[in-house]
Amino acid sequence: MKWIRVIAIALARQKILDRPLALNFVLKLVETSSAILHFKSVVYPRSRTMFSPEEMEALLDEMYNSFTPKPLQPNDRRYVDCRAVRGDEDVVKDLGRTVRRSDDFTYQVYSGYRGSGKTTELLRLKKDLEDRDHTVVYFAADEQDLSVQDVQYTDILLACTRHLLQELKDKANPDPILDWLKGRLQDFQDVMLREVKIEQVNLQFALTEFAKLTAAVRSEPSQRQKIRERLEPHTETLIQALNAFIKDGRAHLPEKAKLVVIADNLDRIVPIFRDNERSNYEEIFLDRHEQLKALECHMIYTVPIALIYSRWATELKDNYDIPKVLPSIMVRQEDGEPYDKGLDAMKTIIRLRLPSGLRESSLNVFESEEIIQELCLISGGYVRDLIQLMKETINRTEDLPIRGRAVQRAIDALRDVYRRAVEEDWWEALRKVHREKAIENDLLHRGLLLSRCILEYRYYQDDDNKRTWYDVHPVLWKEL
């Protein structure tokens, strides 16, 4: 406190303030300075030498878990609007308006790379429609209802039945579905694994049994085939019962409100090719399109991106409407030069996932601006790879700031994964795509799109025409 008195006496001698006021002024100044220093210590992180090893480890743990790749819920502060660097694609506008404006039921398909942000966008669509008093039944099909390794149309119908029954149980009369189930007790006796009397069939029983059926379809291959064999002869009557249930549910919605079902994660279905060069994709979404469009409500299905780029594209369009595709974020221009708007979006994605005290400046986290730039460029604008690169980089970091060596090790690990996905005779095709920024419409290039070895970009030119182009994932450029 001695230095405070010295300053106060100096102020008093200069007749700036009398001695008591000078002392009080200096004390207030010290209090204010301390508050400012405290504020800075909260908002701006301390240098690594000011963190104890335990504090640094806790901070890195928090960072690591904030980069877990999973969909964002609506209104999540980490959401970044990337429409301007994704060819102006907007699921809320493009899919939502179709639902709201149509007097007829609509059946739409939506696609994109796995991990590109489709689910995040569909959850935003769900909230937007619900905010307008529509009822939305959303489900991620691969979580509880089906196995992406082996899917047939009947699996999707069962999943829709379970989730519609669950979501509308308080709005609609379940009798049509209960009556259908009563009439099939004998057929399903061996897959229900218990004897059931007709008088036991009620709403709770139906909810439980449909959940058991879809769980078995998802995880028990032997039961899966049995269930399909029992259900297949009765799909038409199930659709009729389900539509009666849906009709009653719609009658209890607010005036002009619509019922929408979003079946997500069907784009993850693993392709199985037949001898006639058709695949399970065509069997499910084309051969069975009448059944997929038989439910009397609005339907949105996610479909594999390889189907969008197949020779069946026009048939898909005729059956469902023009498909909507979520492309990658454009971080480079076609000539290879960095695209600042796209890079800014990717940097914002990183920044918003950082702990609050680290968001003000990237230099609090990274050794240099060049390091974060390299991470964004090497991701190719593919959001999941950006998130996973950050997670891997943090795992190779012992203290902040993150150094170039840790980033390079993470990039090398990702490159190894992609390199193993490319068979020897595919490299020439990749070199051609890298040179020409275009793809051929064949099985090889569809497979490379599905594996994300090739990425798609879109933007609008000066004459307002949309331009779509392709390039090899940047992590593979060193291998070309």
Image (tube, rainbow, N blue to C red):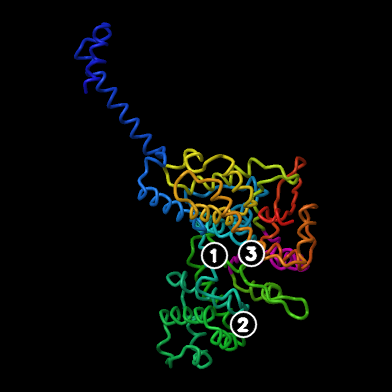
The disc, 2 or 3, on the residue closer to the chain's N-terminal end is 3
Where disc 2 sits, the SS reads helix
Write down the quadrant of residue 426 in the picture.
bottom right
Question: What label sits on residue 259 in the rendered view?
Answer: 1
Which residue matches tag 2?
236
Name the amino acid, label 1: Leu
Residue name at image x 40 percent, y 49 percent: 59
Q: Estimate how packed mark 3 is, as few (under 14), some (14 to 19) or many (20 or more) residues with alpha carbons within 10 Å.
A: many
Q: Quadrant of the C terminus?
A: bottom right
Image: magenta residue range: 297-324
Q: Position of residue 176 (x, y in %)?
A: 50, 80
Write down the quadrant of residue 13 in the picture.
top left
Q: Position of residue 435 (x, y in %)?
A: 79, 52
Q: CA distance from mark 2 to mark 3?
A: 20 Å
Q: CA distance from mark 1 to mark 2?
A: 21 Å
The disc, 1 or 2, on the residue closer to the chain's N-terminal end is 2
Write down the quadrant of residue 160 in the picture.
bottom right
Where disc 1 sits, the SS reads strand
Name the amino acid, label 2: Glu
Residue name at image x 40 percent, y 88 percent: 200
Is the Cβ of the residue at disc 2 closer than 8 Å to that at disc 3?
Answer: no
Name the amino acid, label 3: Thr
Which residue matches tag 3?
106
Q: Between 36 and 97, which is closer to the camera in this rendering?
A: 36
Relative to residue 151, is residue 363 depicted above or below? above
Q: Between 175 and 316, which is closer to the camera in this rendering?
A: 316
Q: CA distance from mark 1 to mark 3?
A: 11 Å
Q: Is residue 121 on the magenta stretch?
A: no
Q: Between 472 and 220, which is closer to the camera in this rendering?
A: 472
